[in-house]
Amino acid sequence: MYVGTYTSAEGGGKGVGLAEYDPRTGRITGRGVLTGVGDPSYLAAHPDGRTLYAVSEREDGAVTAVRLSDRTVLGSRSTGGAAPCHLSVHPGGRWLLSANYGSGSVAVHPIDASGALGERTDLVTHSTPPPGPGQQGPHAHQVVTAPDGGHVLAVDLGTDTVYTYRLDEASGRLTEVARARTRPGAGPRHLTFHPGGRHAYLANEVDDTVAVCAYDPGTGRLTVGEAQSTGTGSGTNHPAQFLVTADGSHAFLANRGHNSLTRYAVEADGARLRLLGTVPVGGDFPRQIAFSPDGGLLFAANQRSGTVSVFHVSEGGELRSAGEPFASPVAVCALPL
């Protein structure tokens, strides 16, 4: 497991945390730190499992590649924007996509045969529509490839919009083909697809709601449904990230503020979420959640408590704590491999 942090934050980490976990018990054991990457707040692995990628969430944003066999840093490249907070590898393994939160833009970098990154091939800034209520500008928060592989979607909290692009896999250029608006002031943060590929679930950070979205693989068009409850009551809460089980039967949402995980049953082939309730996350401010590769464990990176919580996931969508959380300074991203 690799754990992202803020190295510049008070009490933050020294780099990417290294750990191992027992897939049966969920127990995490620390294995040191990978230094050489500043503010690695979000992590992603190449599909072949040989290279780790990290953002440097700083004003002068960058993305860094690390060879996992010997933990050698293969170099960094500028994202062309400020405060990159999310990245993902295109399924083909040849392109790295990153989202610059501070400047509201999406960058593309080529990945060579060694896993290293080349010079940026594109940078798209979300200049329209104008910022939503309470926002000063665009804030790209996530960039992800749809299950069809033909479209890249960027979620922008500042403009209340999800942008759909086609990625030219020869040139590494993005072309916008559609955009979907949320209700004003929703502040969309994170989108997760149902395995069926026809629906996705949107976590709205600002207004504490979620929405079921219909998705057309042919056109890349996303249609945002009605706002739904996170089940967290009337207190201050900021949804962070959705996960959907591999069989598409259940979904889980991380709640910062309420400090819980909302459980949903997924119905109607992905078209409906039914609220089942919430489970305490056992930490403060769960920033990101992830499944183990076999789906049997769920990990929650709790930023303010500096811990990673672990839960056993049952076939019926139940979550059961796997014991005391693992201490990791300013844990903002947990990547189990």
Image (tube, rainbow, N blue to C red):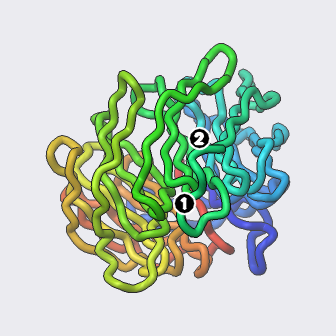
Using the image, determine if residue 240 lies above or below residue 105. Answer: below
Furthest-left residue in this view? 268
**Residue 218, percent across and down?**
36, 22
Quarter where residue 258 is shown: bottom left
Within 10 Å of disc 2 (Cα), the crowding (few <14, some 14-19, many 20+) is: many
Tag 1: residue type?
Gly
Name the side, left or right, on which 326 lies relative to 118: left
Using the image, determine if residue 32 lies above or below residue 109. Answer: below
- Residue contact between numbered discs 1 and 2, judged by CB atoms under 8 Å: no
Quarter where residue 328 is shown: bottom right
**The label number, if any, that marks residue 132 in the structure image:** 1
* Residue 1 appears anywhere in the view: no
Using the image, determine if residue 35 lies above or below residue 106. Answer: below
* Residue 312 appears anywhere in the view: yes
**Labels 1 and 2: the sequence-earlier one:** 2
Q: Nearer the viewer, residue 30 or 203?
A: 203
Tag 2: residue type?
Ser
Describe the element under mark 1 as helix, strand or loop. loop
**Residue 327, percent across and down?**
60, 76
Q: Which residue is drawn at 74% across and 23% down?
A: 112
Residue named by callout 2: 88
Q: Residue at x 43, y 72 (%)?
A: 255
Q: Which of 169 and 299 is in front in this view?
A: 169
Name the side, left or right, on which 5 lies relative to 243: right
Within 10 Å of disc 1 (Cα), the crowding (few <14, some 14-19, many 20+) is: many
**Residue 79, percent across and down?**
77, 42
Q: Residue at x 48, y 57 (%)?
A: 188
Describe the element under mark 2 as helix, strand or loop. strand
| Position of the N terminus by quadrant | bottom right
